[in-house]
Amino acid sequence: MSANFDSSTQRTFTLTARLLSALHLDGPLFAGLLAICATGLGIIYSAAGEDLGMFLRQGGRVALAITALIVFAQVPPRFLRMIAPWLYGTGLVLLLIVMGVGDIGKGAQRWLDLGFVRFQPAEIMKIAMPLFCAWYLHERPLPPSFLSLVVLGVAIIVPTIIIMEQPDLGTAMLVAVSGALVILLAGLQFRYIFGIGALVLGSVPVLWNFFMHDYQRQRVLTFLNPQSDPLGSGYHIIQSQIAIGSGGVFGKGYMNGSQAQLEFLPERSTDFIFAVIGEEWGLIGLTTLLLLYLFVIARGLYMAATAQDTFARLVAGSLSATFFVYVFVNTGMVTGLLPVVGVPLPLVSYGGTSMVTLMAGFGILMAVHTRRSLRSREL
Amino acid sequence: MNRTRRIKDQHAESRVFARRTVIAGVVVAVCFAVLIGRLTYLQVMRYDYFADLSQGNRIRIEPIPPNRGLILDRNGVALATNQPTYQLELIREQVPDVDRTLQGLVDIGLLQPDDIARLHRVIRARRSFEAIPVRLQLTEEELARFAVRRQDFPGVEIQPRLTRFYPAGGSAVHALGYVAAISEEDKTRIEEADYAGTTLIGKLGIEGTYEAELHGKSGFQQILVNAQGRRVDRLGLTVPELARKEPTAGNDLLLTLDTKLQKVAEAALGTHRGAVVALDPSNGDVLALASTPAFDPNVFTRGLAVGEYNALVTDVDRPLLNRALRGTYPPGSTVKPLFALAALEYGVVTPQHTEFCPGRWSSPGYGRVRRDWKPEGHGTVDMRKAIATSCDVYFFDIARLMGIDRMATFVSRFGLGSPTGIDIDGERSGIVPSTEWKKRAYRQKEQQIWFPGDTISVGIGQGQMLTTPLQLAHAISTIASRGQRFQPRLVKGIRDSLTGQVRELPPTSLPPAQIADPAGWDVAIGGMIDVANAPYGTARGAAARAPYLIAGKSGTAQVFSVASNERIRKAGELAERLRDHALFVAFAPADVPMPKIVVAVIVENAPGGGSAFAAPIARKLLDAYLLTPEELAAQEAKRQPAPVATTRGD
């Protein structure tokens, strides 16, 4: 209305802001996510050996994931809270069905085929778990009582064990972590945290001596010293460290990574894509990517901190922190800080299912955050 | 609600949550700092090292195969060792054209054209940087032939390797087994990482069954290779630290076999088809296990051409068949001592019971008239004499009195009809016929019926009864030790390759074969002593001038079917293969509570009966085991002029 706003840049800016606001999207978070996805696409093209087919397929998945984000951002938080227990129940039932039906198609035990679409019920759990835990704690006084902890403990452990049996250790861990983070953020007393920590540490020697098979012990020992098994699982680690290390500060240049391009590096477009970036873009490329991740996580945590009810806070906090765990487990594995667990680099690794789930989660995060501003304005 | 309900305090909760979010933020920041620190370490501090590794100069990981454990006989004589040989290895990523290279190796005569398809499959299945053996055990001449053309074959190298070597060739091959190239089927049984660099795996016998002990664990070393794939020692000016893990050699096995005795057994069998098993009745040790004809296991380690292998498999004499464990033969009269014990156990006769043998036998309902092996008959015999003379008529009659099922139950206690459990794979069960067995063995109703006449045939070890030489030796060992039974075993100790300590394996005892009146043993053993020593014994020549007391039993097994083997067409050979099998079982010394050795001998289609042909073989083993070298020499000298007393009988 005023002459001050009539420069065209200003108008574009306002237009974008209004569009984002109308779609319940958070501008900075959205921009960060798009930047990560774009980086991922660029790397896939190189890591896949300039395979245009793979590039286009991954592009399609990114588009689908962005759509999922926008769709989930439209869901009112109150509705989400209402359906949280039902979503959790459905996910659990589907997991049980997959466990029963999966025997027919050996090796494909994670997938449920509905005829028109195939999906992994474990992915639903990645969303349903934090929603359910947040829903459960929303009405109850915090910090959570002992009874609540027991109920939530069971609610987390049961699906985790089913997914572990599929077997998909990576997803099982992420589902468990997303639930546990809700409880931690809800203000779980430190005496419980330390108690559970001590319990876990204490059970290690018992597990080691009485419950683990020789080959499982061997696997743990291989992680502690990958050089002891350079032809088996140690091979991945050794090759990925050579790739990253030889990238140096500036990298060998896009599509010039000899480790990756000469197929020394295994699983280079999926779990080990971080090493490809390190080889081709060097320390600068990796640091930039890590800063992008850090920005997204920080923005997520900020949105959680400014949310106005318990449910919104817990959901937003858990989703952001789980995303961090995702990033750290993958990058830690590729750089040799953590054991080899099959977790992809979020939003970058080739493959679609987890990307759609992740972006849907960010959609929920935005829904929770933008509705808050609406409500405060109404008040 | 029985408790005071806590009230939700939104502000307090919000404060707690904010604090927790801050903690989360700090954790995130610390983790990212650690990550970036790690990246700095890898990409800045160790950049030179990794850059060198990735640029042309690369580290290759080379497996070091472990030395296979040795196999030694009971006196420490080596039966299987490792010998250095040279082999050709190919590394795919360094070969410009695999097809041309393989064809080139065929052209200079180092590969057979038949090998190419198989090698292609192997090469495709392995990683591109792995060294794949394409030709094992090069001769000196082949080595030279390759060496002069080496520049034509980039990526193909001569490598020294240790290969299995059997110093005694085909001796004891059926106990030892052999090693050969790892097959697809083998790969399902092993952890492939443990076999990186190993090309041979145990098949059959000790080598196969004790593979896990013998193999050991692979080691590895990192080696530096230049862009051409040749090994180099340094990267520019630096000598990088290269990891190396020594392999763990396999454990050595100490066998129960006595090489000297084994060779006596093999020499005595000579060119005949047959088997010899010698056991120590006090612990189940297998002292000798021979099966003829044998084959040279060394040919398998160098890789057999298709033609050579087919020749072995289709040989009419079936050298690959382990007759001692897998050959099943009617035991003939050698089971008579067992049925004698059974008759006493079930009380159908007493040891003093006598029967008149007219040389023929019949009984209403038991079918045709049966003839004794001695047409004029043995006259009046009691149990001991019936064993000594191998009187068929006596055993026809006690078989009639016992009935087949009681006979079957009794001999099963001595291990017949089921594997003895020897510690190598592939043993057959043999057959102890019974009414129950016939129902299981035949599909059609009319074939399932047990006829009384069948019982009579089994009474003298014929009919459908089948035993392996090992089972026979085990059953006789049980008589010799008066009921004690041990699982036959070939391995008595394992020497740990790391500590050098020998772990002695205790003998495995089996449920003893007990009889109600232990006096029965004296009758059975007495009969067997008379076989070899009494003037009317069927094998009285076998014990001639022996300085120790021999107990034995001869047997003849009728060959009823050879028609199945079509390759035997020539009339002369047909006649030879229709001849009966000769059997002899023996133990000595027979006048002590625990004899030292039990022997079972089977000679297929022998030119004479059990006592004439198999008994002298058994005697040679007993002499070799029980006599000192001087005694043995003296015995030989005495025997030279005089032929072994001719004995007749079954």
Image (tube, coloured by chain):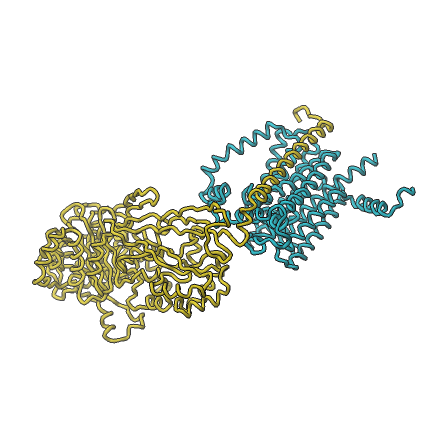
Tell me, yes or no, if residue A329 can be seen here. Answer: no
**Image coordinates for residue A103, horizontal then vertical, percent:** 55, 52
Expressed as whole percent of the image width and height from the top left, the position of residue B171 reads 26, 58
Residue placed most toward the observer, A181 or A128: A181
Q: Residue at x 12, y 61 (%)?
A: B378
Q: Colour of chain A?
A: cyan
Q: Colour of chain B?
A: yellow
Left or right: B14 as drawn, with respect to B255: right
State which quarter of the image contains the N terminus of chain A. Answer: top right
A199 lies above or below B456: above
* Residue at position x 20%, y 54% in the image: B260
Residue nearer the viewer, A24 or B529: A24
Tally the marks. 0
User: Looking at the image, can residue B297 be seen?
Assistant: yes
In the image, is A337 to the left or to the right of B21?
left
Q: Residue furthest top?
A: B4
**Figure quadrant of the C terminus of chain A:** top right
Give the quarter of the image for residue A189. top right
Q: Is residue B136 left or right of residue A156?
A: left
Please name whichever residue, A354 or B85, is drawn nearer the observer in this view of the structure.
Answer: B85
Residue B401, x across and y down, in percent: 22, 56
Tell which residue pokes out farthest to the front in this image.
B237
Q: Who is closer to the viewer here, A101 or B193?
A: B193
Residue A36 x %, y %: 69, 47
